[in-house]
Image (cartoon, rainbow, N blue to C red):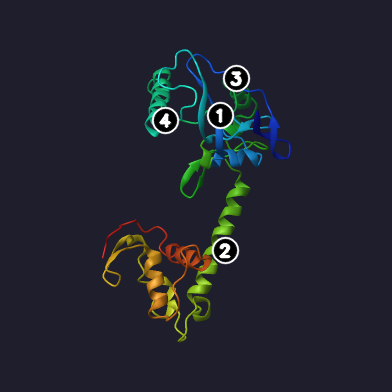
Amino acid sequence: MKAAVLGENGLEIRDVPAPKPKPDEILVRVRACGLNRAEVLMASGYRHGSQGGPGTIVGLEWSGEVVEAGAQVKDLKPGQRMSHEQASKVSRELMASWQRAHPGERWEMAQAQSPASESAATEAAPKAAAAPSQQVQGVPIEKPAQGQQQQGDTYASFHERDFKVWQTETQKFIEEGKRIFHSDKLLGGTIGVSCDMCHPDASNTHPETYPKYQVQLQRVALLRDMIDWCIENPVKGKTMDPNDERLRALEAYIIAQRKGVPLDYGKH
């Protein structure tokens, strides 16, 4: 069968042996398949817990129909598609099985290292093990040892360099929003009015209070709805497409000015 496999230079489509289902398993012919975030990271050379590296078959997000069922499978047969209810039932049973095997524990991503190798690493580098954790956006993360990649949670599986790149790109996006916010031409205005004339430095915009009912629109509005309203009315321009990079940048700039303010949707 064909499969997406991690190679030395990224994803490759290869011929691999078809698996044989165990008595309590089914074999599914995949009709559509995608990569989730963890697999995208793995395709970029990272590891996701114990998963990753050349030879790893990816494609967890799939759908298809049953072609073979194990002897113990009672409610699925060849040619049948699993319903949402059946899929949910399987998910619950898998979680219940894991919890029975690990009483008193929470669901956490397994680490790539074995207990023995972790112990050896701790003995070899006691200072690194004792180092205080770093924080990323206020969330503590353990700094990986020299030459190693961050392990554990999907959203913490990155290098310090990655975080700096993400920070830089985010700030560039916010700065672009600031540039548009202060420019009647970039806003598409027709009478020389820009957003900062009513809201210097995005003051009195209160992005943390959205969604909320807005009398001007006679409905519950998101922040971007009010940005569009302002562009159409005080600025006398045309409303922007929801995917317009200018609208997204404006939204980012306004939200950034209220960093640290608690969310309080619906507040007036």
Q: Distance between the residues labelled 3 and 1?
A: 39 Å
Closer to the eye: label 2 or 3: 2
Q: What residue type is labelled 3?
A: Ala
Of labels 4 and 1, earlier in sequence is: 1
**Image-based side of 24 in relation to 14, left or right:** left
Residue 29's disc is 1
Of labels 2 and 3, earlier in sequence is: 3
Residue 116's disc is 3
Location of residue 129 with respect to 22 vertically, above or below: below
Mark 3 crowd level (few <14, some 14–19, many ≥20, 10 Å Cα): few
- The percent position of residue 84, horizontal first and vertical second, equals 39, 34
Location of residue 232 with respect to 74 vertically, above or below: below
Identify residue for label 4: 87
Q: Which amino acid does label 4 sit on?
A: Ala
Which residue: 46% across, 48% down? 138
Q: Distance between the residues labelled 4 and 2?
A: 42 Å
**Image-based side of 214 in relation to 1, left or right:** left
**Image-based side of 67 in relation to 257, left or right:** right
Task: Residue 260: tell me if it is visible.
Answer: yes
User: In the rendered image, which quarter contains the C terminus?
Assistant: bottom left
Contact, CB < 8 Å: mark 3 with mark 1?
A: no
User: In the rendered image, which quarter contains the N terminus?
Assistant: top right
Q: What element carries label 3?
A: helix
Q: Foreground residue, 98 or 32?
A: 32
Which residue: 26% across, 70% down? 215
Closer to the eye: label 3 or 1: 1
Mark 2 crowd level (few <14, some 14–19, many ≥20, 10 Å Cα): few
Task: Residue 133: tell me if it is visible.
Answer: no
Q: What residue type is labelled 1?
A: Arg
Identify residue for label 2: 172
